[in-house]
């Protein structure tokens, strides 16, 4: 009886644990020693994902089960005592956290970042109505684990420390496929790239999902989920439009129902003490004969601008900035910003540059968020984007031919 009670207490303690320390190299006191090929198991609650280990070619995926959703501070020590290392770190579903850390032989560096994790359950009852893909190939965005990805030419991980970070503010994203955490190459989004540009003092929680309009986001209880966890001092980025175009019916349109739904998102964010920020939709790849991007989004970008004025909400004009970006590349090279032959969804390069557009707006026009930007953020002009040839975030080996929902 006493032994059974002790076992129950041990399991309860493990379930409540909110800080973890793992050592992959030297046997540091107070750290759990992780062998190079230790696979994750529900009993152990940590380990490498199947087909991934420090002994394999990158990327390497390491997961830790956490007792509750929310923000976690992650500190990773990188380096190798005998060789050069080059490491890029992503989290959950390919969210860029750390971009290309290079260490010389015997040199070690520590990087700290924040990871937001969530489950479909909504406090108070109910849950988000997930799409089938979110339950399978995109489950890392919704499970009870933190999954870290170590990639690049020669990643070298020495130690990982994880602790709950309830005190930090959060940037929530409510958006469609151009902002969501895309699961596989060649697709990517600006929401996946955004965390890289912030200090480990503010988290990014990407609740965007492919195929969503404002109405379907509401209907699937995605906004209810966001509102169940958003707090005073947080921010809500709202970018829809691509899929709202498909909605039909009497009185349905950009300047009527769409704008009214935008105002509901704004109102609910404010009721919870959060600050809403609107984004106009990114352009599709629609060049005319003169090499200019044409508008395929009707009045939807204008509806966002009007809602911003009417509700006194900041507007990031990503529609205008994406136009400048695509036209700077020109018809011959703009496809580098898109995923294969897709004309809506972006490549790693395209999403990185669009994230830089958003960050540039924050740097110029939003002092409250500007203070959270990473020290290495520099001015950016979408009319003079980074050269594609110098872009160096390694793609994933896993690719798909299935396009994201929506268009």
Image (tube, grey):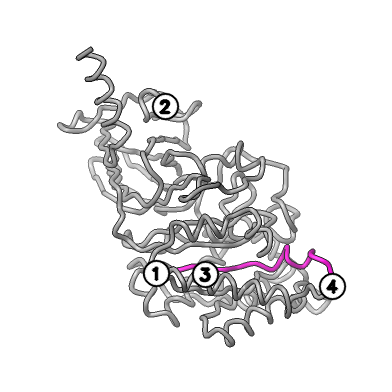
Q: Nearer the viewer, mark 2 or mark 4?
A: 4
Label 4: state its secondary structure: loop
Q: Is residue 192 visible?
A: no
Task: Give the Cα distance between marks 4 and 1.
Answer: 46 Å
Q: Which residues are magenta?
A: 235-249
Q: Foreground residue, 100 or 112?
A: 112
- In the figure, 161 relative to 386: above or below? above
Q: Position of residue 62 (x, y in %)?
A: 41, 35
Label 1: state its secondary structure: loop
Q: Foreground residue, 9 or 31?
A: 9
Residue picked out by circle 1: 377
Label 2: state its secondary structure: loop
Label 3: state its secondary structure: helix
Using residue 361 as the reference point, say whether residue 169 is left or right of it. Answer: left
Image quadrant occupied by the N terminus: top left
Q: Earlier in the sequence, mark 2 or mark 4?
A: 2
Task: Give the Cα distance between marks 2 and 3.
Answer: 39 Å
Q: Earlier in the sequence, mark 2 or mark 3?
A: 2
- Residue at 54 percent of width and 56 percent of height: 207
- Residue at 26 percent of width and 49 percent of height: 110
Q: Are marks 2 and 3 in contact (CB under 8 Å)?
A: no
Q: Dot 3 surroundings within 10 Å: few (below 14), some, or many (20 or more)?
A: some
Residue picked out by circle 2: 40
Using residue 97 as the reference point, say whether residue 307 is left or right of it. Answer: right
Label number found at residue 268:
3
């Amino acid at each position: 009886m006493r032994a059974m009670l002790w076992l129950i207490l041990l399991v309860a303690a493990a379930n409540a644990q909110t800080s973890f320390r793992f050592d992959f190299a030297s046997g540091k006191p107070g750290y759990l020693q992780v062998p190079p090929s230790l696979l994750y198991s529900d009993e152990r609650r940590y380990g490498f994902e199947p087909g991934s280990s420090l002994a394999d070619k990158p990327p390497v995926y390491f997961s830790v089960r956490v007792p509750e959703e929310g923000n976690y501070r992650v500190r990773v020590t990188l380096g190798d005592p005998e060789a050069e290392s080059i490491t890029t770190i992503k989290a959950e579903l390919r969210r860029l956290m750390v971009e290309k850390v290079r260490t010389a032989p015997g040199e070690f560096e520590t990087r700290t970042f924040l990871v937001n994790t969530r489950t479909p359950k909504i406090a108070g009852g109910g849950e988000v109505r997930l799409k089938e893909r979110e339950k399978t190939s995109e489950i890392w965005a919704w499970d009870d684990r933190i999954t870290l990805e170590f990639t690049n030419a020669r990643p070298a991980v020495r130690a990982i420390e994880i602790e709950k970070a309830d005190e930090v503010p959060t940037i929530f994203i409510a958006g469609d496929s151009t902002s969501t955490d895309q699961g596989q190459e060649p697709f990517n989004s600006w929401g996946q790239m955004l965390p890289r540009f912030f200090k480990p003092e503010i988290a990014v929680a990407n609740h965007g999902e492919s195929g969503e309009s404002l109405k379907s986001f509401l209907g699937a209880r995605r906004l209810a989920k966001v509102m169940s966890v958003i707090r005073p001092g947080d921010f809500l980025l709202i970018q829809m439009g691509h899929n709202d175009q498909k909605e039909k019916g009497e009185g349905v349109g950009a300047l009527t129902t769409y704008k009214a739904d935008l105002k509901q998102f704004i109102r609910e964010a404010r009721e919870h003490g959060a600050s809403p920020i609107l984004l106009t939709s990114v352009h599709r790849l629609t060049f005319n004969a003169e090499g200019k991007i044409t508008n395929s989004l009707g009045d939807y970008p204008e509806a966002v601008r009007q809602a911003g004025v009417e509700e006194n909400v900041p507007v990031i004009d990503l529609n205008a900035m994406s136009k400048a970006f695509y036209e700077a590349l020109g018809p011959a090279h703009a496809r580098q910003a898109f995923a294969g032959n897709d004309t809506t969804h972006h490549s790693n390069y395209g999403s990185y540059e669009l994230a830089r557009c958003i960050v540039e707006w924050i740097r110029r026009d939003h002092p409250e968020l500007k203070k959270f930007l990473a020290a290495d953020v520099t001015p950016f002009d979408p009319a003079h984007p980074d050269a594609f040839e110098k872009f160096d975030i390694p793609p994933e080996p896993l690719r798909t031919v299935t396009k994201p929902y929506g268009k």
